[in-house]
Image: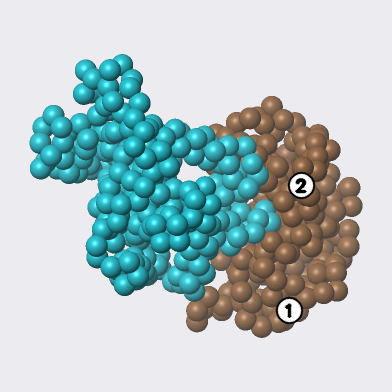
Chain colours: A cyan, B brown
Amino acid sequence: MTDFIQLFINGLAIGGVYALAAIGFVIVYSATGVVNFAAGQFVMFGTFAGVAMLLNAELPWPVGYGAALLAMALFGALFFAVLYLPLRKSPVVTIIIGTVAIGITMQNAALLAFGSWPFRLPSPVEGVNLTIAGATISAHAIAVVVVTAVMVALLWLLFFRTSLGIGMRAVAQDIQAARLMGLKVNRLLALSWVLAALLAGIAGLMLGPMWFADTSMGDPIALKAFAATIIGGFGSLPGAIVGGLFVGLSEVLGASYVSSAYKDLISFGIMIVFLLVRPQGVFGERVQDRG
Amino acid sequence: MLACKDLTVAYGDIVALQSVTLEVGRGETVALIGANGAGKTTLLHAISGLNPVQSGDIMFEGTSVARLASDRRVALGIAQAPEGRRIIPGLTVEENLALATVSWRRWRQPISGDLARVFDLFPRLKERRRQLGWSLSGGEQQMLAIGRALMARPRLLLLDEPSLGLAPRLAEEVYERVRQIADSGLTILVVEQNTVLALSVADRAYVLETGRIVLHGTADDLKQNTRVREAYLGR
């Protein structure tokens, strides 16, 4: 039982990271129709922004985290200006291929800047452990679960309680109607990329102390976030959260109780079962063409 | 108030509007009638800034708006209730209405007066204020589309096929409200396939055929015009 509690919290922590990455993915997809194949590299950039600020520049963690997230927000705006804006009149597939290109570029840029040797990003609560019901749990895992929950709550407030967030939902649902209502549509679209980059940054900073920071870490994260959105329901925010937690739990519990060699097989196997049996996912929305 | 001068709009090689010239004076209600595919919606899209204009100009209160982004045009006072209503389906009635005030509303400025005016005009919307947009009936969605355009505090109201897909009684009810809005002094340009309804509220009307204005005059003159009677009034 103590093992299970420990694994469960660790699974929730990894799952929280996947959930944040998946939420960023869903925000961009529902606002712009673009499937962001660089989503994993966004998270990798978040981790390496942490490496640059905390390990290279040796900033104290509150300043370093703030600077890393600011850099990520700027990166999201840059991504919008360099990729989305010039291509927005082209078919959406062109933009999707563009995200693939930028993802590869990001990975190689990180490789050039940081080398192939993995880093270990420290946690602000490095080495602190808590005992809960006899189980020893790292304070970092608890912190990740708490931060994920706070982020979800803040996002809910943004999307349902502020006119900015309600405007973003309007743009996602009917962009022409949003234009006729006088919304500054481009600004709201840019904001969705900034938000996705910020969430990826938070995910990356939290993931750093749990994994080794390695410039090729993006693709496995993107695949997990993608599996999370398939399981939760493509385009659904609650789905991204539930799917992310589910993938994280199945990975950690599967590695421990079945075999660590098969941990990816379990989450992707479940994704494939969902694609076969319930392709709309847990929180499925009926498939519709975007107008 | 609104003047389109020699307006030409094309989709690729297909010319949708061919040097259209049209004027709407302050306080007037003008109808634009024509068959399906004549270019009526294209013209309203061009006025609202959803379509680029190839040549010609759109003047609004003396200044050219033809190159302005759509949100700037709404801020100047051009609001539209588009074809097919285009209610934001996942927002409530009240959210749809409140969001349409972004063009003029400053931080936390109250909008209850504007809401009350719209609810006065369309009491059904008040009953449904917490319901999501998709759950409304066609008639209620049309009322919401018009109400939403009014929330932008327009000086010119563009209505695109407000009778589309509505039962005759409901369509008449919607036009009853349009007349009420017109009587309040707001300038209206209404696009409509239902010529009888359109001419019932309009002071003047233009007839659009395959992208060209072929006829214009006062509503009363057009009702007597043989060509209009045969082609659009069916008698």
Q: Is residue A234 visible?
A: no
In this rendering, position of residue A221 left or right of residue A125: left
Residue at image x 41%, y 61%? A56
Q: Is residue A95 visible?
A: yes
Q: Position of residue B33 (x, y in %)?
A: 69, 62
Q: Quadrant of the N terminus of chain B?
A: bottom right
Residue type (three-letter) at the residue carrying disc 1: Asp
The quarter of the picture where residue B131 lies is top right
Task: Give the residue at mark 1.
Answer: B57
Q: Position of residue B89 (x, y in %)?
A: 54, 42
Q: Position of residue A163 (x, y in %)?
A: 65, 44
User: Could you say which disc has been placed on residue A207 in the image?
Assistant: none
Whether tag 2 and tag 1 are in contact, CB under 8 A, the answer is no
Residue at image x 54%, y 38%? A154
In this rendering, position of residue A255 left or right of residue B75: left
In this view of the protein, which residue sits in the foreground, A16 or A121? A121
Task: Give the residue at mark 2.
Answer: B107
